[in-house]
Image (spheres, rainbow, N blue to C red):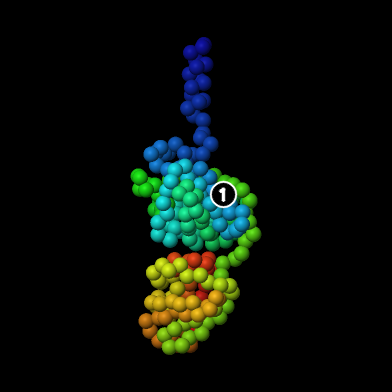
Amino acid sequence: MLLQRRRASNALRHDAQRANPLYGYDYNPVWPSILSIAHDETDGGALFIITDRPCVLGGAGNVLPLTVASLDIVNGAMILPVKFRMVMSGAVPLGAAWQWGTSASDLYDPVTFHAPNAASGNCADVPGPYTPPAAVTGTSISGNTCTLVFDRPIILSGAPLDDAMTFNGYAPNGVTSAGPNTLDLDCPVALNPGDPWAITRQPPWITTPIAWPQGGTL
């Protein structure tokens, strides 16, 4: 009878479901782990990722296997070697569920070159006030230059230009700040009234969060 009770007890213990099914599957203690993901209490559209050991953030910091509130990651920055700030494409709800997967990651351990272990949880702390991303309020053209006017100041990051913005299907090959809220973008071809323009993702060469997708005609 005692032996049967022990077997039953062991069976129950082994059959119990894990509280977090992402832990324990492909978990490797040599790889880093996420201790928490918390709201930025000064910005409702940003999060902090806290890791259990120093990591580095490469690229624009927006290629991460992080899913939270169906939002995209606009860009990321290292605050401390174990603390990373992510600007999201919208407001992050209080207590929002997050999940860290196993796909490509700009965040990784410089010793093992591996991203953090898969994990999940809920965002800690309280979100701060939210300001929507910058939107284009006007356009004008002169030769091969398009001027975009935004609803707030725009800060350039200095990163190389890419095709996150296109004008008549062409990516710009030069950009300057014509004013606090204005960008002059030089294109490889002359632009004409009625040509289409589009912003399809956050340009890595702009630090200010930009609303996307947005577009129209010149």
- Rendered residue at 58%/54% (across/down): 40
Residue 217 vs 160, above or below: the answer is: below
Q: Residue furthest top?
A: 1
Q: Nearer the viewer, residue 176 or 64?
A: 176
**Mark 1 residue element:** strand
Which amino acid type corresponds to the residue marked 1 in the rendered image?
Ala
Could one spot residue 147 in this view of the protein?
Answer: yes
x%, y% of residue 159?
41, 67
The residue that appears at 45% across and 67% down in the rendered structure is 157
* Residue 45 drawn above or below residue 192: above
Mark 1 sits on what residue?
Answer: 38
In the image: residue 55, left or right of residue 178? left
At 51% from the left edge and 12% from the top edge, which residue is drawn? 2
Residue 53 in which image quadrant: top left
In the image, is 210 to the left or to the right of 160?
A: right
x%, y% of residue 49? 51, 50
Task: Identify the residue at image location x=47%, y=54%.
Answer: 78
